[in-house]
Amino acid sequence: MTQIKNNIPQVIEWPPSEVEGIKTKSNFLRGSLIESLEDEITGAIAPDDTQLIKFHGSYQQTDRDLDDERKRQKLEPLYSFMIRARVPAGVATANQWVAFDELSDKYGNSTLKLTTRQAFQLHGIVKRNLRQAMQGINDSLLDSIAACGDVNRNVMSTSNEGLSPVVGEIAEFAQSISDHLLPKTTAYHEIWLNKKLLTEGKIDEEPIYGKTYLPRKFKIAIAVPPYNDTDVFANDIGLIAIVEKGKLLGYNVAVGGGMGKTYGVAETYPRLADVIGFVAKEKALQVLEEIVRIQRDYGNRENRKLARLKYTIDRIGVDAFVELLQQRLGFELEASKSYQFDSNGDVFGWKKASSGKWFVGLFIEHGRIVDSPSLSLKKGLREIADLNACDFRLTGNQGLVLGNITTKDKKTIQTLLDKYGIGTAQKMSGLRKHAIACVALNTCTMAFAEAERYLPKLIEKLDVLLEKHSLTNDDILIRMTGCPNGCGRPFLGEIGLVGRALGKYNLYLGAGFSGNRLNSIFKEMVSEEEILALLDPLFEQYAQSRLENERFGDFIVRQGIVDAPKVVKVIR
């Protein structure tokens, strides 16, 4: 255990995990990636490189639908790669949207994925095309470095400027955070962009991260009350914008959030971030850097399952953490300021910003941009992008905002949205329009069950129950993931479904509609038939016995249907 001296914890020399050893000998994330990419015998890369390539924004995957058949044929798995591009605050230009649309067709599986961290993902890229795809991303003036790995990942922020006059300023701050905490290694340019001159006569240094980077992934998000559309309390650091008379004063700082847990390991758990104080906007970046440095120094480097900041804080104590932070900063955080979150979903439809420009929030089911027989989504959005009359803003709920639209272009864009039937959230149930699902099967290596491919079908059946109880138009948060790693933030769903095995899920209930309360386990290992049978009477009770304006999750907790869930703590 960590020893406390004068309430300041002492640094532990952890016996390094296997991944720590890989990072240590990697020469600042190079490893043998160049050799792996040039090996034409296999579609895979070397085992150690599968860890290092994450720092470059890519994961090695297989088509798990085909694994058994390929094994019977004595073929290696059908390897491919996912590339995730950083998009701070989710803001991309029309030209960047076009670039990713083209890259998905040229090198990927002709789909785009909008993630729950406001990033782009390309799927189905084979090894021989990986460099070209990376270069195409960089040609668009985006990149993938630090989109994955044990570093600060894509910085999230409320992206719809129609919701608050400070959203644009905060998006710029998100970009500044991303730039400041970006790894300084030149390995990315050397491996993917063939820019070896960058490293001639130069020794890489990482002034913030050090040689072995962080013990585990690190996530930062900003939200602008009353909209918690980035789920700030699910992040290692959550910044809550404090605005008075249309001016940004600074941020309440929340630390220690994280959704992931591991089945069978009781020491792991989802956790909401604690609010530890307020910082003026001019000092916010300094506070963020010091929190990252503390996690670098104090995080568990022996057991990756216990390596996130949430476990560091719970191990040393939040009071000791705050004292250590303030000692390093040389100043104290102010007492947190009042705020109110009303929801953590997206806002759909047209909003006019203080700039006079228009922004429109669109529903994109589970963030998958693809054409289908019933919806030409990819084609329609490409036609809009070709106009170069708006930017494209990814949301933390896998949705999309078209922004910075002039009054002159508003009608043209709405005509195209109508033509292709894009973003029509008003035509669907309140359950569907707030649903989130991770990718899961068939490509995620950690998935035990379906999520993105299955949840739309389950919602069809749940909608029948909701209609029976006159709840179709009630907004209810449902989240589904294929495993408990938490990419789709399932533990913040009023209804959370977490995969245990094919066709089996753990059912969680009772989260807060604004992201301020975790849900609790209701029933383990349930099938679709059991999910419907369990929720039907609960919907009926809710329809008959709820209080005025009471949310489904609040009703579940008030009725004692689940154990009292954990809520956000305000420390000071």
Image (tube, grey):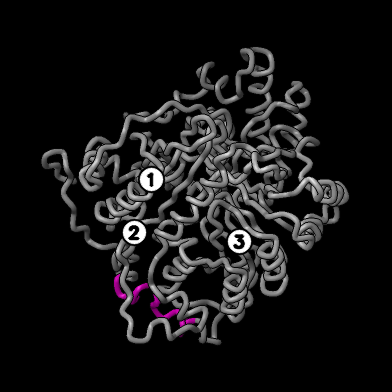
Q: Amino acid at mark 1?
A: Glu
Pick whichever, 168 or 201, lies toward us. Answer: 168
Q: Residue at x 26, y 44 (%)?
A: 325
Residue 145, percent across and down? 48, 67
Residue 565: say if magenta. no
Question: Pointer 3: what residue?
Answer: 121
Which residues, given as a range, are shown in magenta?
24-36
Discs 3/1, front: 1
Marks 2 and 3, how far apart at CA: 23 Å
Q: Decide if residue 86 is on the left or right side of residue 473.
A: left
Q: Residue at x 36, y 49 (%)?
A: 288
Query: Would you place residue 259 above or below residue 124 in this image?
Result: above
Q: Decide if residue 546 is on the left or right side of residue 19.
A: right
Query: Would you place residue 379 above or below residue 400 in this image?
Result: below
Q: Number of callouts in the render?
A: 3
Residue 31: say if magenta. yes
Residue 354, percent across and down? 64, 39
As helix, strand or loop, the secondary structure at mark 2 comes to: loop
**Number of the label disc, if any, that sits on residue 214:** 2
